[in-house]
Amino acid sequence: MALVLLCFLFVPNWPAFGDKDYQLKAIVGANSFDFAIWETRALLAKATAVMANGQAFLDEATRKQVVLDYLAAIQESSRLSREIEQTYINPQVVDPDAVSQPQQAALTEARDHIARVQPLAEAIVQEQVAEILREQGLNAVGETWPPVLMHMTPLPSILIVSPRDKIERQNQLSLAVGLTTPQKEWMETAVFDQLNLSALVVPIGGLATYPAMIMETSSINWLAEVTAHEWTHHWLMPYPVSLRYGTDPQVRVINETVASIVGQEIGAQVIARFYPEYVPQPAPAAPPSSSLPAVAAEEKPPFNFNAEMAATRVETDRLLAAGDVEGAEAYMEARRQFFVEKGYGIRKLNQAYFAFYGAYADTPGATGADPIGPTLLALREASPSLKEFMRTVAWVGSFADLQRAAEEAGVGVTAVTP
């Protein structure tokens, strides 16, 4: 008996109920995402596609049409799903199941077609992205390395956790597909009440598993960009900018911003080469100011979401730095309501929101005055090639490393003024 008492007194408690990571996992519980099952299924699907190698027997025009037909089937599937949902919502429909039978049958047919064509369509897009990457010199022994692999699938959402007194992604947990809004709200509230942390469940468009998880889409522009974005994460994996991803918040922002820059550049080249009719058209040139009608004094300039969000981030940072946590949270909620009035359906605006969206610093907005995005964009502009840019940023393991790289390239590092 004495030995048992000594064990309780001197042996650490297990499980570690006081550990925040343990408590977070307990809050998520059965709502966590099972990566092992997903990886097994995705790798089997990719292995089958590689062995079939169906795209090798198709000419370029047929390959393009296979992809576009596949994306059109996804768009049709989404349309049918919305119609079925509206039928069930409509209170005037007495028997929605019977009324929606034609749409349900069409949806089943569309999903069967999508499942049959998906391996071939994905293989074609992978090869198209890989071809552009090889032309940029991002290859080994004549082949793109690592191989471009992606799989379109329903994606998990992510529970982002930040301290309340500063904006920093402290933790993230992947959640099961298809959670309801009440389930998300419950987890966020539990994290706030039990751990005194800011939390937000966010959707994602892709995840750098291997093969990469890509959200199902009907847009070839978005698909090409995100495929290249996630491949960039794979390419950066052995380097400091990835190895310190989980331990340095600034390195995480650098890593994600680099992937966004590369994804946009490679994605645009894929579209120009293989789908030229989908190249975005430039905005029409503004007429000379002399030909413009006089603007009434009471007319306001158009709403600029990025500028307004950047200003919100700057003021939030100021309040938190001053130690006014509750004031910052009240301010963010007031700003959320302002954005909703302007037509932006932001469910929750808090420290976790900025901790997640502020990591993508290639465009202004949630990053506030963070200089990382503008510095990386300037560094890309100063680099002789995309490959050289990636080689430079791959070895960035801290913000100080980025400053040194910028100085060597003759690029200044300055904060952004929203």
Image (cartoon, rainbow, N blue to C red):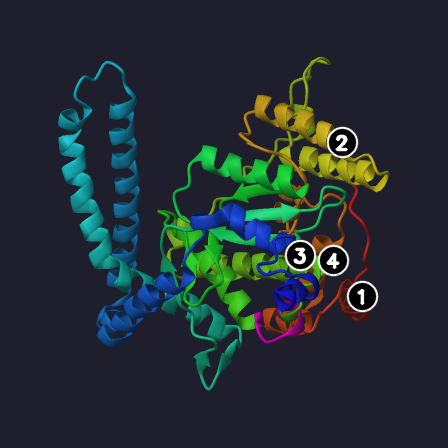
Residue 204, can we see it?
Answer: no
Residue picked out by circle 3: 253
Which residue is at the front of the view, 163 or 290?
A: 163
Q: Is residue 298 magenta?
A: no
> CA gap, disc 4 to disc 3?
12 Å
Helix, strand or loop status at disc 1 = helix
Q: Earlier in the sequence, mark 1 or mark 3?
A: 3
Residue 166: x, y in percent? 75, 45
Residue picked out by circle 2: 326
Residue for point 41% across, 66% down: 211
Could you tell me the amino acid type at mark 2? Glu
Q: How many numbered discs sit on the rendered protein?
A: 4
Magenta region: which residues? Answer: 236-242
> CA gap, disc 2 to disc 4?
32 Å
Residue for point 26% across, 42% down: 77
> CA gap, disc 1 to disc 4?
12 Å
Helix, strand or loop status at disc 2 = helix
Could you tell me the amino acid type at mark 3? Val
Residue picked out by circle 4: 375
